[in-house]
Image: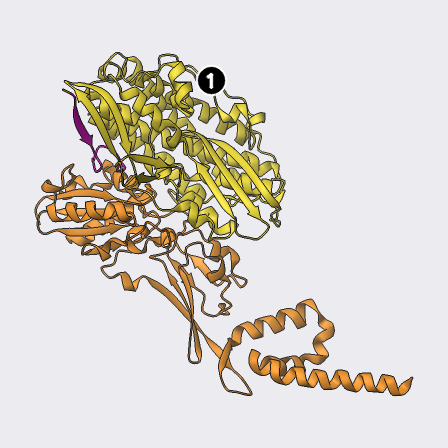
Chain colours: A orange, B yellow
Amino acid sequence: MGKISVYRFLSAGCNGCDVQVLECLVPRYKLAELNVEVVSNPEEANVLVLTGGVNIKGREELIKVYEKINPPKIVIAVGNCALTKEIFDKGYPMVGPPDQIVPVNFYVPGCPPRPQAIVKAVTQILGAKLEEKEDYWVTPEGFRGKHEFDRDKCIGCGACAQVCSSDAIDIIDEGEKRVVRINYGRCSFCAFCQDECPTQAIRLTREYHLLTNNRGTTYVTNDVNLLECASCGTFFFPQPQIDWALKRIIEEKVPKYLEFKDEILDAMKLCLKCRREIMNVKKAKKTLAELSAKARGS
Amino acid sequence: MPEKVYVGPYRPQLVEPERFELLVEGNRIIDAKIELGYMHRGIEKLFTTKTYMQSLALAERICGICSGIHTLCYAQTVEKLMNIEVPERAKYLRCVYMELERLHSHYLWFGILAHSLDEHKAFLKIMVERERVQDLLEYLTGNRMNYLINTIGGVRRDITPEKAEKIHRFLNESKSLSDYIMELLNDNGDFTRKTKGVGVLPREKALEVGAVGPTLRGSGVASDIRKDDPYAAYDELDFEVIVENDGDVRAKALVRAGETYESMKIIEQALDNLPSGEIVSERKEPKIGEEFGRTEAPRGELVYYIRSNGTNIPERVKVRTPSFANNFAILEMLRGETLENVRVIIESIDPCFACTDRVTVVDAKTGERNCMCLK
């Protein structure tokens, strides 16, 4: 591939990714050496860089621009809005993500992706080599990048899914497994999940080069075993969470319950439905017996 | 015979898409209209579907360039609703982070101004030097933009002595960039010639259209929320409000250049007087009622209004961004100018259309277009 002429298109984003694309032009990233330039007219371009999730008004413009791009018509979606609309997913004017409107070849996840990530993506697409000697290619300590699970620590409680600001975490119960799935192509990298996790099982690593050509692969998953109901046999609750809760409640917080440990364990082996049916009858019987004894005594 | 000229919506010179309808006679602009909506995302509606904490990430994504100040303004308004006292150290840290953001935003603006004046050497020089602020912000907060450093009740990351030292080192280096920009504006070269007397916004007009921030200060009005209605630790820090009287593009540039020095002064003072203690207070339940908060964003006064019904999800959030107030100033400045200057005049208010995008309502009977104030 000869000269690469890039045309930028933005609709319904926050502007952050667009500024990062602009920053790629700074000489230290050496894009000019790869024969890459940014052009001001779609008719002169052969690569289209998309940012933002596309709204009703941008849709027509996007189709018009796409038709004007010269072959090979490579389309790169930069940033998570261009992948999945991210936090704006449920906004009423949104019609994207862009790959629903025009074909997209590559995706660069991030919110916003570092210019380094965009430059690396471009060089990888071109099959070129890049020298990465300088410090700025390494992310600093505390950078919020791709997620990582500590498989031993995760108890499958789902607190991360509740606090997630852009609905990027799904809790899926399949048979005897519960799958906790983080879609980093939809993540806003706020790290609320990392802060909120009761067992510190989620960590945001310093990995930032996340280029992909398939939007369906941007997942980090972990699975935990579900407990089987002793009565009806359905899988209903993550086993590690029960262990964690028991340890926390009985051994750390309220040691006086220690003598009822077995009863509590038995009760926890029943699913909510069965527990309601069986336990309440037992409790009702017990209460009735107590009441009648009291009456006889007086 | 006047004719209509359309500028935009997708013009590579501007970072963001928008469309201007200019009524032109010869080479002079008689009237101008603005058409927005290419960036509209329905954010104010989305606010009412997320909890107060989740909305922090949403507030930040109203605008990627001034993302920090949006979370600060939002958090301060929620803190009023929840009746939270922010720790002293967090107040100082907020000042440090927000002034660093002002530096990066103003430098970016100078870069884009140089670009729109076709001064490519200056553009590259400013953008190269500006990388230092971005690297520093990434080092301090964990992300280059959308850093989510402010939270309800304080800040999320502390500044350790070694981080403080890195900031001091950065301030020494970045002074040279501000000096370079000042020189560009004062050396009577191309930069001065192309901006002097262009797009004049007289003091009375600026007040009439309700301009804010550097656009207003460039027209001789000393208005700065950091001084007029101090928030965070600004009442304890010493800085000046930069005012220029000419009202043209150069005056606005001089205001911003002066502000970069003031920002450095604020950061140095805040770091030297950093109180010890906690950096975040505990969150509480919001009261039933409404609150109003304002801060000085890099582009001017930013206003948040939040109404709460006592649950963990706000009932209504209204945002008035500085670019929305300044858009009317563009129309005022464009009148009577020539077509060559359109680009630099539009850039002079540092427009942020991600911030300001509205719904356009078209009257089906008359075809008349009106902008509505929905975020």
From the top left corner, tell me how far across and down residue A191 is, in percent. Answer: 45, 53
Q: Secondary structure at mark 1?
A: loop
Q: Where the N terminus of chain B falls, by quadrant? A: top left
Figure check: A278 above or below A126: below
**Which residue is located at x 16 percent, y 36 percent?**
A40
Q: Nearer the viewer, residue A188 or A153?
A: A188
Task: Using residue A33 as the reference point, say whether residue B48 is left or right of it.
Answer: right
Is A100 drawn above or below residue B228 in the view shown?
below
The magenta-colored residue range is B2-18
Question: Does residue A133 show up?
Answer: no
**In-image side of B357 versus A228 (left or right):** left
- Which of B308 and B343 lies nearest the eye of the viewer? B308
The secondary structure that most of the magenta stretch takes on is loop
B18 vs A226: above or below: above
Decide if residue B291 is in sight here: yes
Residue B217: x percent and y percent?
42, 19
Q: Is residue B5 magenta?
A: yes
